[in-house]
Amino acid sequence: MSTRSFAIGLGSTPKRVLPGFGLSLGISLTFVSLMLLLPLTGLFGQLAGLSLAEYWTIVTDERVVASYGVTIGAAAVAAIVNAAFGLLLAWVLVRYEFPGKRLLDALMDLPFALPTAVAGITLATLYSSNGWMGQLLEPLGFQVAYTWVGIALAMAFTSIPFVVRTVQPVLEDMPHEMDEAALTLGASDVTGFRRVILPHLWPALMTGTGLAFVRSLGEFGAIIFIAGNMPYETEITALMIFVRLQEYDYVGASAIASVVLFASLALLLVINIWQGRFIKRLHGGNG
Amino acid sequence: MQRIGDAPTVRRLLIAAAVLLAALFLLLPLVAIFLQAFARGVDVFWANISNQYTLAAIQLTLFIAVLTIPVCLVFGVALAWLVTRFRFPGRRILQTLIDIPFAVSPVVAGLVYLLLYGRNGWLGSWLDSYDIQLMFAWPGILLVTIFVTCPFVARELIPLMQAQGSREEEAAVTLGAPGWTIFRRVTLPNIRWALLYGVILTNARAVGEFGAVSVVSGAIRGQTNTLPLHLEQLYQDYNTVGAFASASLLALIALLTLAAKASLEWRAARREVHA
Amino acid sequence: MSIRLQHIGKHFGRTQALEPVDLDIAEGELVGLLGPSGSGKTTLLRIIAGLETADREPGGRILFGDRDVTHLHVRDRRIGFVFQHYALFRHMTVFDNVAFGLTVLPRKQRPSSGEIRRRVHRLLEMVKLEHMAQRYPAQLSGGQQQRVSLARALALRPDVLLLDEPFGALDAKVRQELRRWLRHLHDELHFTSLFVTHDQEEALELSDRVVVMSNGRIEQIDTPHELYRHPANRFVFEFLGDVNHLEGTVRDGVLTCGNAHLAVDLTDGPEELLLRPHEIELAERPRHGAQLPVTVTAISPVGAEVRVELEADWLGEPWLATVSHADYERLALTRGAGLYVLPRRWHRFPAERDRLPSRTAESVS
């Protein structure tokens, strides 16, 4: 393989019909190495000076562990809420016609387009005790701002498009014969949805929810304003890295960052593998 | 046509639920931004915008975006061309690698750059000996912004170019067109809208990046403060109206991004109908 | 169970997909709905299934036996429906697909899981796929998928089996095989079935009776034999096979067209005669009363017969004749050879719009 790829690398193989292989490969590899991979070496360089015990001490520091709990817990709640809410939105956008549908559809991308800091201060203002939502919810006993609920809310806001935009195209491509087949076989709406439609959407829904979860784990800007950032209670892991940096504790920051990095990459890998397996089954095992 | 969930009551109930939730969850914050920005009237809004630090932040933000876009454009087009027009070992890995910026927390992204190019980093200390400082200055902001935005153009182009296949380019080759002509006259017209949308997304993210930038910027007012960092400072100083004035500018860019997307999609759908 | 439609029509927006039709299908009949695309045949089938609702018109009714199902939801009509593209549930095994209808029955009517297993296996045996029970649809060929789809539709022992272009997506050989197999299955189980097709050969081969449709209208309902021998109108005639046209003017019992003449028993005036390719003979010499000179332009042996393309100055469009291999050799046909056509039969459909009885004549020899 290596000799072949080397020959190809020179862009001289007659098999390539289209031009530009060498150039595009050069640009892509240079960019990926310099911009994506090289910086990651800095992180490992920083960690290389650390013994395993020291590393362990840093990443299992009580306050840091509490931040894992807050981050994962809130991200999980946000992901689950988004799975339901995202499914509802995708369903309504694909299956029904109603005035304002295009507007609603466009609105779905807002969390991606809106800078996270803007989302952060807006949510913090809305849900603080004298904000519009806060005034409404607090008398009912719901404290959102400066609690983990606020963190989950901010996470849900920034990651809802992942679910909607992953489920939507799959639902659109689902042939109407699937519904009709279920109905001709006597299925009720609920049974048909549960046994035919939901399994069809399941891979997309899980992927979208997984991506939303990963995004929530790393989210920073949208959360720190509404979180209150109380140590042990409403401090997220991304903030812990930031705090260490402000203390000029680069080693500590790197160690915690490596945990976040590995968790995200591992999750992404799991999502990819899982998705691949599912797709294989639906589109033929020999493919 | 009979479909599951078509009963009028079910339909109305679900639409109502979706609209209500979307309004509360998505629309209300958007409205709140502008209402807060103008809470003390247009004059105060203008005073906040024309404040010298705000203007400096706007300037820096636009400067960074203007530099980021061409870099991402070249990289995105090159990568998309590479992975959709050729098969070679490592193609899948390359495609996975460009998703790294999406998976990495922005704070971590900022951190890795700081570690590498900071005064203690191995590249940074070497640059430092030549008196070049990248971190806590605009080049650092530019670097991390490129890092977080580089997948957008490629991600828009790859699925499209994959779906279109390379038949048209191959036809052009058989007709004797040279490489650049093929790209300019055959490929580009087919991908221009996706390309444009990729640029719009890159821009939206470039002007709005917060986490990564806040790590490497140092946030010196009037010098290394981008608009998102500036509004954070205002917010922390309890200048809510000032913060929301800056936020409204960013929200406006976000709205333009959404409008651009909607119109591009509409255009694509219309072309499909005509085809 | 018999099916009876009374005054059933359908509009999509402002276009009329189906003019109000009446249709009676006897119990145990296998009926084909034949027509070009856009003729309303699929709409009609889907209305019977309950997948589309017919226009609300006074007197519009659908009856299955004595049961009025006009306003019944599709899930309560007890029909089996086979889709053109199979519509199997991709995330379920073959077994689960076939079992689906049984497992979604209300608990009181649902058979025990053992009973379900037994019934599904019997169905899979019937469609010769019992060894595939644990496969997923994506692992099956098109023909196998369609058989699963059929087994799934039959699992609930429907009163009526409806098939929407069931073999349309399959290649010619598999289609042929499945067709024969469906006919056998139907003869064995005697369910009432109705299938849609745009392939006249399929309709004629498979059906007890054929409903020919065009432009949202029923043109003719008849047995395949009657349909072919006595087409009700020109559309049916032309749709059921290749047609040669002969246009000319009749005077004193002779139709003239350029330098061609044919003796016909018709009154004077312009006429158009239609001739099937197998209803014309080729000869080296004209016959009394038939002077139709042609030139052979193409010869292609297709199966049991030879298709010969003919041209002449007096012909607007080339004619097609099918001759036996014996005749082909006897005449020593070559491209460019000059021959004469001797019509055995011809048909005419005068005053099409008034729907006057058409006429078929044996040619005078």
Image (spheres, rainbow, N blue to C red):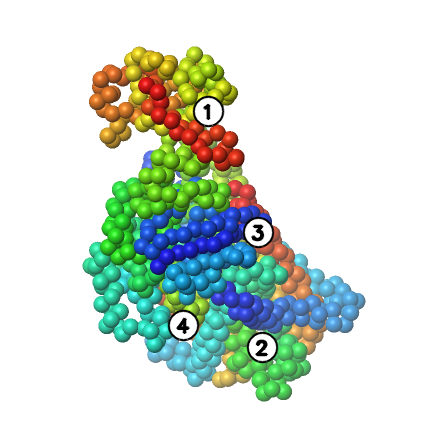
Q: Which residue is mark 4?
A: A259
Q: CA distance from mark 1 to mark 4?
A: 87 Å
Q: Which residue is mark 1?
A: C272
Q: Is label 4 or label 3 in front?
A: 3
Instruction: Categorize mark 2 by other alpha carbons within 10 Å: few (<14), some (14-19), many (20+).
Output: many
User: Given the image, on which type of amino acid does mark 2 rest?
Assistant: Ile
Q: Chain ID for label 3?
A: C
Q: Position of residue C56 (x, y in %)?
A: 55, 58
Q: Residue at x 42, y 69 (%)?
A: A188
Q: Determine whether the residue tagged by mark 1 lies in a helix, strand or loop.
A: strand
User: Given the image, on which type of amino acid does mark 1 rest?
Assistant: Glu
Do discs 4 and 2 share a chain? Answer: yes
| In the rendered image, the vertical position of residue B20 relative to residue B167, given as above or below | below
Q: Is label 4 or label 2 in front?
A: 2
**Nearer to the camera, B90 or B174:** B174
Q: Is label 1 or label 4 in front?
A: 1
Q: CA distance from mark 4 to mark 2?
A: 24 Å
**Residue C246 visible to the viewer:** yes
User: Given the image, on which type of amino acid does mark 3 rest?
Assistant: Gly
| In the rendered image, the vertical position of residue C210 relative to residue A220, given as above or below | above
Do discs 1 and 3 share a chain? Answer: yes
Residue A259: quarter of image: bottom left
